[in-house]
Image: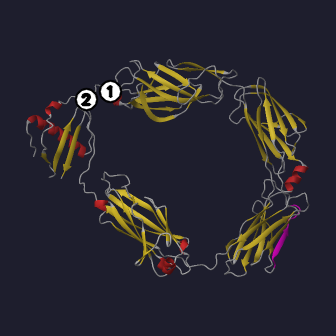
Amino acid sequence: MLRLSNNAIGRVLVAILATIAMLVTGVNLTPVANAAETAYNPDAPAVQVTSGVTVKVYKDKNHTQLYDPNQPVAIGQTFYGQISFDFSDAEKPTLDSPTRSYKFPDNINVKDVKSSTLYDSEGNVAGTWSINNGEVTATWNEDWLTQHPSNITSFVSFDFTLNEDAGGNDNKEHITFPGGGGDITITIDKSKVSGQKDYELNDDGTVTFTVTLKPQFAVQNMVVTDTMGSNFTFVDGSFQLDGKPVNAVVSGQKATITLGDLAKADKDGYQLTYKAQLTDAAKQLLAQGKKLDNAQNVANWTWDGSDNPGEADVTPNFSYKMVQKSNGSGTASDIKWTVKLNTGSLKADMGGYKFTDQLQGGQHYIGSYTVKDAKGKVVATGELNGSADSFNYTFPDDAGAQQYTIEYHTALNDENSTAKVNNHAEVTPPDENHPGGSDDGSYTPKGPEQPEDKNTYVTKDVDSSTAATDGKAEWTSLVKFSLMAANTDPTSVQFTDEKLEFDKASNADGSKDGGFGFDQDRKPVLTIGDKTLTEGTDYSLDKYGADAFKITFKSSNAIKAAIGKSDVQVKYWTVSDKTPGVYKNTAKVKYNGKTTSASNSYDIENTNLVNKTGSMKWDKDFDWSQIDPADTPRVLGWPTGRSMSIRAMAVSARSIHLAIRLS
């Protein structure tokens, strides 16, 4: 039943009722407007823009420094542009054709941009735009086009680089932006040719050096000068450009290679390669385990017109690693040992090398040993003497310069022992010109296998009887010292609570986290039976904060007496802002390397029966003089049997405020 004091107010309340009905059902109101003469068609094909275009190019991403055409830039430098559209009536976007596109010049590479917000010249949202394959596409919104039928302007930003062939053999690139965007000339810095230097160690012990040159323009008379450290010497006849031999003049530690004229390089550049070998003195240093002190290799390159030569250097780092022994693995009755030989970047010729393994006591050999080459093929095997404390193997003369792996097994003399055992491996070279080395490994038994501990050493209960009214809850956990072994060290037992969880009710309007936290006005209380434990004597309380705390027990008489007999009760409190939802808490106890946990929760129910949101928009033509702010609340009948009470209504020039209760 609808009761109205007069017809005018009745019409207003009917309108309000219709609005509220839409809100309850999730319907949004739209402004009152005349129907458009033309329907909006976002699927209409894009129309190319041919006029009204203005382009500016900047040096910086923030568009604060315009590009200076007289300032040379490096190949590959990024430029930052802004393109503005001032559409004529003939080309402007319309409701039935809201999409426009613009093709950038072919001699620049424009970075793609995913769909983004389009703004007009006043900063208002006008639609969306994107850049793909050198073309920008913009689609204007229906609302914006309805409100702006003419004088349409918009702008977008874009990043670009020059094409690889920019400037050709010249140092200038001319860019013409279609649609009246203007001409821009970019001056290219062609005073630099980039390059880098690398090395690779070959199987024959030589080193291949590579100089990669990447001219981004044609150069004349390219000359590379390479200076080798005193630890190396050039290998005659090894100089090549992209796999083809080139002439080089070698004088001591310096080589001069004339490459002649080079066209602009592709993405891989030009590859100049040559070989070098270690001197006998360098090999001797490395065999003694020392580092090379003069191994740097420097390349310089010049060409006609270059102001400064290009340069790149590399310092090879070579070393032998003759023995790499891993720790033992497996069980007390079968310990596996693995020794890798000759694993360094430099490979020694293993012919004539002698491998020796030495046990350090507490174990004995079992089974046999195997020797594998670099490909994993077994090349030798032999039975092990269980009463011996060592064994050895000598490599044949044709063993070669490669990695080898030796595997063998031992067993503990006392399989119940928990004492660590050690093992020493060593290789002896055939002469002083070859490197040697040694390494050690160990094995720590786990001892007799212990049964799996299936105990849970913590419980958790909660009293939330007042949580809905004052937000407070009392939590009680038991640390199960009664289940712990008699030899337990109390200082190794820790109790932590660091997991407070809040799951807000789906129709709750409260805070995001429920204000859920530990009560900072009350510290946890610990007891054993009727005895209250003392902080600092029986336990320490670490970092008691709103979201976490930790208790570490001490080796006091009270705690030691509880082991295997009694439990420690931990009582503590939390507070919340009473937001409806589920409040959950988890406690953990760490004991003997194992962590167990227990959780509990409580629920504050939501008493709101209806909670709906929606939106309203302003009707500028409504006659507000019909509303009397002093009107009393009206009670309305609903088909569902519920009623609505409008408790208050405040009217201003731009808003309506309603307080509504449904029952």
Where residue 30 appears, x then y in whole percent? 27, 35
Q: Name the residue carrying label 1.
A: 146
Query: Disc 2 versus disc 1: distance between alpha carbons?
Result: 10 Å
Name the residue rendered at 45%, 59% in the picture: 545
Of 33 and 417, nearer the camera is 417
Range of magenta residues: 388-398
Name the residue rendered at 47%, 82% in the picture: 565
Residue 45 visible, this orientation: no
Q: Are marks 2 and 1 in contact (CB under 8 Å)?
A: yes
Determine the secondary structure under disc 2. loop
Residue 68, compared with residue 193, is above or below; it is above
Amino acid on which disc 2 is placed: Ala
Colour scheme of the picture: secondary structure
Where residue 614 appears, x then y in whole percent? 27, 43
Q: Name the residue carrying label 2.
A: 33
Q: Which label's residue is closer to the chain start, 2 or 1?
A: 2
Where residue 518 appears, x then y in whole percent? 40, 61
| Left or right: residue 60 compared with residue 48 | right
| Left or right: residue 513 compared with residue 171 | left
Name the residue rendered at 84%, 45% in the picture: 294
Count neighbours of disc 1 (C-alpha within 10 A) and say few if under 14, some if 14 to 19, many if 20 or more: few
Residue 623, compared with residue 648, is above or below; it is above
Mark number, residue 661:
none
